[in-house]
Amino acid sequence: MKLRVNGEDRILDKPLNNVGQVLDYFGVPWVRAAVELNEEVVDPGLFDTTPVRDGDKIEIVSFVGGG
Amino acid sequence: MKVYINGGQYDLGGSPTVGHVRQQYCPGADVVIVNSVPVSDISTAVCEGDHVCFFKKGNLPEQRELETLILARQPEAITSRLKAACVGIAGAGGLGSVVAENLARSGVGKLVIADFDVVEPSNLNRQRYTLAQLGLTKVQALADNISGFNPFITVVPVHERITFENSGTLFKGCGVVAECLDSAAEKASIVSGIMKHMPQAKIVAASGLAGIGDGAAIVVRKIFSRLYLVGDSVSDADDGAGLFASRVGIAASMQSHVIIRLLAGEKL
């Protein structure tokens, strides 16, 4: 499966169905993630029900603590 | 020709110099600033549209001139844009208290500052509060501090916990929102909330500022279409690296600087 992740084309070695699975694939804890899928923000409560398709553009920010 | 002297508009005839104008409007002034630049040569010509400030050190300035004098070192074209702006600040801790101070000193017209917490001792190593403010809500303490150096801006203190759901309502009307929270989960949630509920707003968030690592590793990256992320992206306060005024302050100053550039109309 092919996705454009944070501006880079990535070939994933297995098919992924939703945003939550993409986060797991890249090892990003859901609770720290802000995600844009095809330039639309994804509600953090809907990561596991928001489908991803071949060729989608996904931007992921994984936050670390401190302020 | 029209010139601005300590904020007032005047019609001057002839070819006046700084010295002539000073003699007429503020004799004895030892601080002379023309279009944001300190001037020592009083034979410098004053030109149409110039913004000239005079001040005699040790004097108490007239209230009506004070706002102009506070901002005398900033070019008027930028100051007028900042004055027209409204900025949201999500969190009034190590990042938010510094971002708010920088924006208020620069004359950003309206700041909506939201935070649910009160000032406690472990804040004081990096957050801009004093011992006398222990126990006060941070938003009130910050509003009080700002009124002590720039009473001419509007501060809206919101003593409330910011959530994904309420973020759009709390910061309604803000063209830019600074994410200044402490916990990674809250950062992710509030950035998502603002992205979703404020489709026009730009967001300047911070991630990766803990510890005593290289200050120059803190950079600005544009992610998404309208999110600017300040930090090194990896230094996590949860790893025990600690939080220091100097490094948190670099990130906060960088956040406020991005905001000032955006408000000034720079394309970032």
Image (cartoon, rainbow, N blue to C red):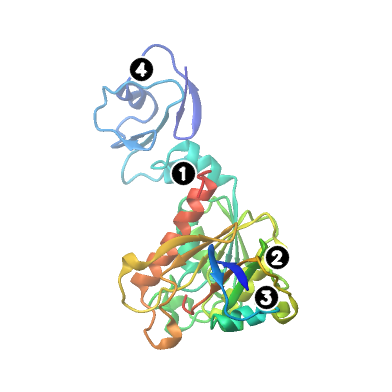
Q: CA distance from mark 2 to mark 1?
A: 40 Å
- The structure residue drawn at horizontal position 53% and vertical position 81%, both measured from the top left corner, is B135
Mark 3 lies on residue? B163
Mark 2 lies on residue? B196
Q: Mark 4 or mark 2, which is nearer to you?
A: 2
- For the residues bearing labels 1 and 3, Cβ distance under 8 angstroms: no
Mark found first going from the N terminus, 3 or 4: 4
Q: Dot 3 surroundings within 10 Å: few (below 14), some, or many (20 or more)?
A: some
Mark 1 lies on residue? B66
For mark 2, give the secondary structure.
helix
Count every numbered label the image shows and give the total. Answer: 4
Q: Dot 2 surroundings within 10 Å: few (below 14), some, or many (20 or more)?
A: many
Q: Mark 1 or mark 4, which is nearer to you?
A: 4
Q: Identify the amino acid type marked 3.
A: Thr
Q: Mark 1 or mark 3, which is nearer to you?
A: 3
Q: Nearer the viewer, residue B19 or A60?
A: A60
Task: Please say if B83 is above or below B238.
Answer: above
Mark 4 lies on residue? B16
Mark found first going from the N terminus, 1 or 3: 1
Q: CA distance from mark 2 to mark 3?
A: 12 Å
**Residue B207: horizontal and vertical position, in percent?**
48, 72
Q: Identify the amino acid type marked 4.
A: Pro
- For the residues bearing labels 3 and 4, Cβ distance under 8 angstroms: no
Q: Is residue B1 left or right of residue B83?
A: left
Q: Identify the amino acid type marked 2.
A: Lys
Work out whether residue B158 can be spotted. no
Q: Chain of mark 3?
A: B
